[in-house]
Image (cartoon, rainbow, N blue to C red):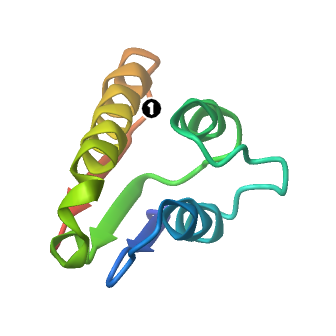
Amino acid sequence: MSQKVITLDLTDCKYIMDFHQRIKKAFDFPDFYGENWSAFWDLLWSECDADKVVILGEHTMPKEFDWDLGKMHEILQRTVEDRKKHGFHFEFEIIS
């Protein structure tokens, strides 16, 4: 069985709305995605069947996004741990 990988490209992302739009597009989230971290967490469980998320372009984002990037990493790590508890595989990798 092949692994389903989502690539989230954040290269040159400069606005928080763009950040969440890129998430929505990469994860193929529905229109009701609330474009906030609580909604991201919820939809990772209900709408994401990926085994792996690859993140590109973090280093190109302004420092103002440090908190948001940290929050995204925290949610992804929590997803890794929670899915493992339930017998599912999930991982994420930050390429750049």
Position in image of residue 35 (x %, y %): 64, 49
Classify residue 74 as left or right of residue 7: left
In the image, taking residue 15 as reference, residue 59 lies left or right, namely: left
Whether residue 12 is visible, yes or no, is yes
Q: Could you tell me residue 81's position as x and y percent?
A: 31, 23
In the image, residue 59 above or below residue 48: below
Count of number-bearing discs: 1
Q: State the image quarter where residue 94 is shown.
A: bottom left
Q: Quick one: which residue is furthest to the top in this view?
A: 85
Q: Please give the name of the residue rendered at 29% of the width and 56% of the height, measured from the top-left corner.
A: 65
Is residue 2 visible to the viewer in this orientation of the structure? no
Q: What residue does disc 1 label? A: 88
Name the amino acid type tagged 1.
Phe
Given residues 39 and 83, the one toward you in this image is 39
At horizontal 40% and vertical 31% (from top left) the residue drawn is: 79
- Quadrant containing the C terminus in the rendered view: bottom left
Q: Relative to 28, does residue 86 appear above or below in the rendering? A: above
At 25% from the left and 77% from the top, the residue drawn is 57
Q: Determine the residue located farthest toward the right in the rendered image.
A: 31
Residue at (44%, 32%) from the top-left corner?
88
Q: Give 49 or 76, whichever is nearer the viewer.
A: 76
